[in-house]
Image (cartoon, rainbow, N blue to C red):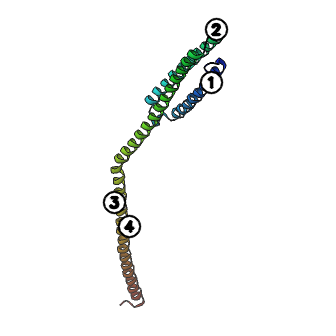
């Protein structure tokens, strides 16, 4: 007796397939949640579109699962053969798996496109900032040169001022020495 001939085995196989599909949808939901945490990386429009598609596929899977359960119950109640029902249910399950696969491809494509957009924007901003960085570097170099020249000028000015003070103190000392010597001489 094959699984198509035994309704209990067919139901068990379909239940296993449904669990596998639910696990896959759960994984896609987790990936989508991770993307929701960083909407600026992939863009809000892309994220909203993916969320909508995920919700649509999830609703379709629930409806299809309910229909499958109802159909299995009908077949079980009627005692009819499961060959046709198994095929119909299997087709529905395959359709749901394909839609989940399409969602996965869309998620991967959106993530790849977002990564490329981020790289492109980073390169564009890098290029746009280059003149500012070069100008800032030149300005810093020029400012350093101006400070260096100002320090030289101040040093030179101190040197001149020191020489002038030395000369003035020397002259003042000489005058004081000359006038002190005159006080000792009798005036005549």
Q: Nearer the viewer, residue 82 or 65?
A: 82
Residue drawn at x 52%, y 26% is 97
Question: For the residues marked 2 and 4, what is the alpha-carbon distance in whole angstroms?
Answer: 104 Å
Q: Exactly how many numbered labels are in the figure?
A: 4
Residue drawn at x 62%, y 18% is 5
Task: Judge from the rendering whether residue 152 lies leftward or rightward of residue 34; answer left or right.
Answer: left
**Where residue 13 is drawn, which disc sits there?**
1
Q: Position of residue 167 (x, y in %)?
A: 36, 79
Q: Which residue is mark 2?
A: 78
The secondary structure type at the circle numbered 1 is helix
Question: For the residues marked 2 and 3, what is the alpha-carbon distance in whole angstroms?
Answer: 94 Å
Screen quadrant of the N terminus: top right
| Residue 118 location, quadrant | top left
Q: Nearer the viewer, residue 81 or 116?
A: 81
Mark 1 / mark 2, whichever is N-terminal:
1
- Mark 2 or 4: in front is 2
Mark 2 / mark 4, whichever is N-terminal:
2
Q: Which residue appears farthest toward the front when viewing the image?
A: 1
**Where residue 142 is drawn, which disc sits there?**
3
Mark 3 / mark 4, whichever is N-terminal:
3
Q: Residues within 10 Å of mark 4 (few under 14, many from 20)?
A: few
Q: Position of residue 147 (x, y in %)?
A: 37, 63
Q: Nearer the viewer, residue 42 or 21?
A: 21
């Amino acid at each position: 007796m094959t699984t198509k001939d035994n309704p209990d085995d067919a139901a068990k196989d379909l239940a296993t397939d449904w669990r596998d599909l639910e696990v896959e949808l759960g994984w896609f939901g987790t990936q989508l949640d991770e993307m929701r945490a960083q909407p600026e990386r992939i863009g809000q429009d892309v994220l909203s579109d993916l969320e909508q598609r995920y919700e649509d596929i999830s609703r379709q899977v629930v409806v299809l699962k309910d229909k499958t359960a109802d159909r299995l119950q009908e077949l079980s109640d009627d005692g009819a053969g499961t060959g046709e029902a198994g095929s119909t249910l299997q087709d529905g399950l395959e359709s749901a798996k394909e839609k989940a696969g399409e969602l996965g491809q869309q998620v991967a494509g959106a993530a790849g496109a977002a990564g490329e957009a981020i790289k492109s924007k980073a390169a564009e901003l890098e290029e746009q900032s280059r003149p500012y960085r070069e100008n800032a570097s030149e300005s810093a170099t020029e400012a350093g040169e101006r400070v260096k020249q100002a320090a030289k000028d101040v040093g030179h000015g101190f040197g001149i001022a020191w020489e002038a003070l030395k000369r003035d103190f020397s002259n003042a000392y000489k005058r004081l020495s000359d006038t002190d010597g005159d006080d000792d001489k009798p005036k005549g």
